[in-house]
Amino acid sequence: MRKIVVVGYGPSAHRFVESLQAKGFDGRVTVIGEEPRPAYDRVHLTSYLAGTSAEDLTYDVPGGTVTRLGTRVTGIDREARRVLTADGAAEPYDVLVLATGSAPFVPPVPGAGHAHVYRTIEDLDAIRTAAKDAAEGVVVGGGLLGLEAADALRSLGLKTHIVEMSPWLMPRQVDEGGGAVLRQHIEGLGLSVHAGAGVQEVVTDGEGQVVGLRKPDGTLLDAQVVVFSAGIRPRDELARAAGLEVGERGGVVVDPGMRTSDPSIYAIGECALAGGMIYGLVGPCNTMAEVAADRITGGSAAFEGADLSTKLKLLGVEVAQFGAMTGALDVTYMDPVGGIYKRLFISDDARTLLGGICVGDASPYTSLRPFVGKALPAAPSDLLFSGAGASLDLPDEAQVCSCNNVCAGDVRTAIADKGVTDVPGLKACTRAGTTCGSCVPMLKQLLEKSGVEVSKALCEHFAYSRAELFDIVRVREITTFSQLIAEHGQGRGCDICKPAVASILASLHNGHVLEGERAALQDTNDAFLANIQKNGTYSVVPRIPGGEITPEKLIVIGEVARDFGLYTKITGGQRIDLFGARVEQLPEIWRRLVEAGFESGHAYGKALRTVKSCVGSTWCRYGVQDSVGLAIELELRYRGLRSPHKLKSAVSGCARECAEARSKDFGIIATEKGWNLYVGGNGGFKPRHADLLASDLSTEELVRTIDRFLMFYIRTADRLQRTAAWLESLEGGLDYLREVIMEDSLGICADLDAQMAHHVATYADEWSATLADPGKLRRFVSFVNAPGVPDPSIVFGTERGQIKPVMAR
Amino acid sequence: MSAAWTPVCAYDELLPERGVCALVEGRQVALFRTYDGGLHALDNLDPFSGAYVLSRGIVGTRKGEPTVASPLHKQVFSLATGLCLDERGVAVPVYPVRVAGGAVEVSV
């Protein structure tokens, strides 16, 4: 048997071809796909709307595979053993594999043709286009896929309704109690949930534009975008037309070897009806693909149903279900305030775990799913609290990764026999954690428990963490990278360790970042003391302490921007960013700014950025303290302080918190008696509110506490670890931090104070120093052999009256 | 490729472990001097971002091989071969470079 043809090119087909190759199949494999691209990751499809490209989602085509994309198969000629395609060609096969997947179910209601579905990249493109002119959207379907689609509509800025036929959301994964908690979460995000509701009609205006969705009770939900995401129907039309056996409610009937009623034809994935079930989850579909590949290459693998456990995070809410959804006994933990619902099902003798449901906190899924059908590892009430499962020992046969069917024993073997020491290694070796990623915490745990020392090495050049390197540099009084790598590292460094060491040297010694050998350690931003942009130009941010600026200085910024033709934008940190400067323009721009009294704003550095402030008591009728004055004092004190990551701060003059201080690395809020200090806040990827470290401090106490907080962070954090993550990783957390910097439990406070005093005393403006040094200035050219020539690749267009970069491609 | 050598700057002008860019017959050439005095010339165009910036990346080594990391998204390229070491199948052109009478010369 030499020729295998696969119809459909989704994830199941992809896994099938990969498995065939892994088994050494050397015949011809042709995959015919209807979509214009090879299989892509549907689990993370929603990330496409957040900016992940179609290319990034698309899987590599396994080498040697013949693909025919954008080609529809119109029929199967079983007698002649060939499939016919819409372009009139015929593809002969020895074995045919149907991986035609499924189609979203669209109920036959009036106007349904004007609605969208949510399955392919093209569907998402269409939804994105439709959302541009829309304000409201409706998703029909409150299951897993429906909530994903709702998340997508919400991310596109639409006010979103969810209509679900069942009395609660996600009826397949959670029970009524869990559904109620889930609903509370989702409504808290501003979405409207209409449970127990059907669809009567998609309403359009005279021109065919969608204007709403009518429910059977007659009410109309205003919406310009309607998405049906209420289940799937197997694509079995080819099989049906070819006379293969299909199920009553659809699906190509297969035996445990994935073979259809024609022995030369197999069916896998969502189109297959295996044991009377259609499977829509990636895990079982992958298993089917592997079973078929095994059978076709002479093996005897069988598909015997699958674990339908799920753990996911939808709209920011963790939802998990594993094992059975009923049992003789059950234990429930419910916290409506915290939005947490956890329920375990247990056998009548109270010994065996049967299953569980979690909403708001899915940690029991990770720790307990492997124990389904086995003896309870601890008292049920203990198991329901967060972190309780962390110390449980998994049996070898316990499944860790349900997407790829990997057991704890497989992971242990990889660690013990193949010497794997980290999560990426385990992923490569076992495939565990490569699909949905929910088992990665469990992989980490298995690594830790097996006694593997998880490497803290910064990179291949240093076997130390950043904190360890910091201590080496401090204690041994090392002043250059060359000395450090010669004595404590290997090779010649890289883009990871060089900037990290440059930052350590700057934190400790506060010398000019471009002095001597240090110039070669810096990222391009520090090397040119400006922020690189997508077209290779740079942006310039002068320091405006506390956001306070005189009209004269404001005018200078305006004049510089106008004279150099720069794009101008106000930043989130109460400063002004000037974009589009070529490297040779930076010294000229800065000469003008320095003359007017400006200093570097360090927007380019892992350093203190800005200390934002509200209006404060001088002007504001509510203010209780002078927030602007304090912000300026703090910004001037910590300006130029290099740290493991950028540092942001803000000061609010009263509890109304207009400066948003609690989203900062250190934030200060005025009280009647003094200042409250909050630490470890963060906007960004993973927002975190800062924690209250100390209350009602005098200005002197406040400054001393911040000094120590910053220096302790700089000493002990990992590379690129913001204070939020650092604080969370500190063993003992906030209490420990308080002990160290307020009660001096480690006896280091005098040291920390001295270090900060050194920083304050030795601060010098980097740009003034650079302008005064012809050696440093010489590097600010586009071309070493043509210093006056601007880079011809830099081209600008116009947008809203200002320049914008135009890329050649 | 023309055989002509174009002098671009004095060797001493190159800072060890840092790059510069030269404009040679309309082409942007990124020149690097490594810690051991070695010289390398790659095309300045970063194929990932489409910006002419490779000369401004951080120079280093990976398993002994001299490298530069794109300053935009940090993909690492071999200074010896121009091959991207983080993504197979991507490479940038490498140009012949030499020192003659104290001057760095490249041939494009």
Image: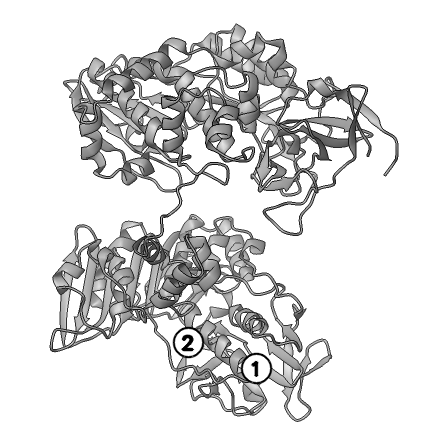
Q: Where does the image place residue A642, in percent across and percent down from the top left?
A: 42, 23
Can you give x and y, in whole percent of width and height, for residue A616 in the image?
27, 17
Label 1 belongs to which residue? A297
Q: Can residue A281 be seen here?
A: no
Q: Quadrant of the C terminus of chain A?
A: top right
Q: Position of residue A398 (x, y in %)?
A: 31, 69
Of labels 1 and 2, the one closer to you: 1
* B17 sits left or right of A272 in the view: right
Choose between A548 and A297: the one closer to the eye.
A297
Q: Nearer the viewer, residue A591 or A175?
A: A591
Give the quadrant of residue A242: bottom right
| Residue A663, picture quadrant | top left
Identity of the residue drawn at 21% across and 38% down: A732
In this picture the colour scheme is: one colour
Residue receiving disc 2: A279
Q: Position of residue A12 (x, y in %)?
A: 51, 72
> Can residue A695 be seen at all in this image of the molecule?
yes
- How would you rate the neighbour count of disc 1 (Cα within 10 Å): few for under 14, some for 14-19, many for 20 or more? some
* Above or below, A104 relative to A96: above
**Amino acid of disc 2:** Tyr
Q: Residue furthest right?
A: B3
Q: Chain of mark 1?
A: A
Counting residues from the start of the chain, the first of labels 1 and 2 encountered is 2
Q: Are marks 1 and 2 in contact (CB under 8 Å)?
A: no
Q: CA distance from mark 1 to mark 2?
A: 24 Å
Q: Is residue B75 left or right of residue A379?
A: right
Q: Amino acid at mark 1?
A: Thr
**Which residue is rendered at x = 52% and y = 35% of the image?**
A490
- Which of the pair A234/A615 is nearer the observer? A234
- Residue B20 drawn above or below residue A806: above
